[in-house]
Amino acid sequence: MLNILFTSISFHTFSQTKGQPSQKDLLNKKNKLNDDIKQLNSQLSQTKASKKSQINTIVVINTKIKVREELISTINSELAQINSRIKKNVTEINALKASLDKLKSEYAKMIYFAQRNQDSYTKIMFLFFVERFNQAYMRINTFSNTLHFVKTS
C-alpha cells in the first residue's frame, strides 16, 4: 500500500516538472492530494493503535509532510497563473485606455478642423436642400437670429 502511495507521489512530482499545467489539472491535483492526506490520516490513526508499528507511523508522517508540501506547491502554481492573468489584464486595460485617449484627441482635431473649414457654401447648401419653402424660411430666420446674437455678444 505504501509503495502505491510513494509511486503516486513521485508521479505527481514528475508531472509537475514537465510543463505548466492548466488550472483544471491543478484543481484535480489539489483534490487528489487532499484525498491522499485523508487516507494518510486514517493510516496514521490505524498505526497509532499498534505499538509495533512506530516505524510505519514515522513513514506515514513523512509521506504526509511530502504530500502537504506538494499541495502547497500546487497552490503556489495556481496563484502564479492567477497573477499572470491579472498582469495581462492590467496591460490590456492600459493599452485600451491609451487607445481611447488617442481616439478622443483625433476626434477633437477633426471637430476643430471641420468647424474651422466651414464656409459660406455649406450654409447656402443647407438652405437650398429643403423639402418645403416653409422649412427654408425657418432656416433663414435661424441664421439671421444666430448672426444677430453673435454680433450683440
Image (cartoon, grey):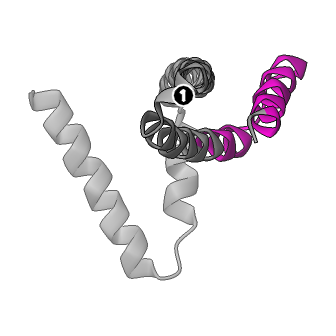
Residue 105 in view, yes or no: no
At a point 23% along the width and 44% down the height, the residue shown is 146
Image spot of residue 20 (x, y percent): 79, 24
Q: Which residue is rendered at x = 58% and y = 17% of the image? A: 62
Does the rendering let one see residue 55? Answer: yes
Magenta residues (range): 3-30
Left or right, 97 with respect to 18, comes to left
On the rendered image, what quadrant is the N terminus found in? top right
Q: Amino acid at mark 1?
A: Lys
| Residue that mark 1 sits on | 52
Which picture quadrant has residue 79?
top right
Q: Position of residue 136 (x, y in %)?
A: 42, 69
The image shows residue 21, relative to residue 27, as above or below, that is above
Of residues 42 and 47, the one nearer the viewer is: 47
**Which quarter of the rendering shows the C terminus?**
top left
Q: Position of residue 94 (x, y in %)?
A: 52, 18
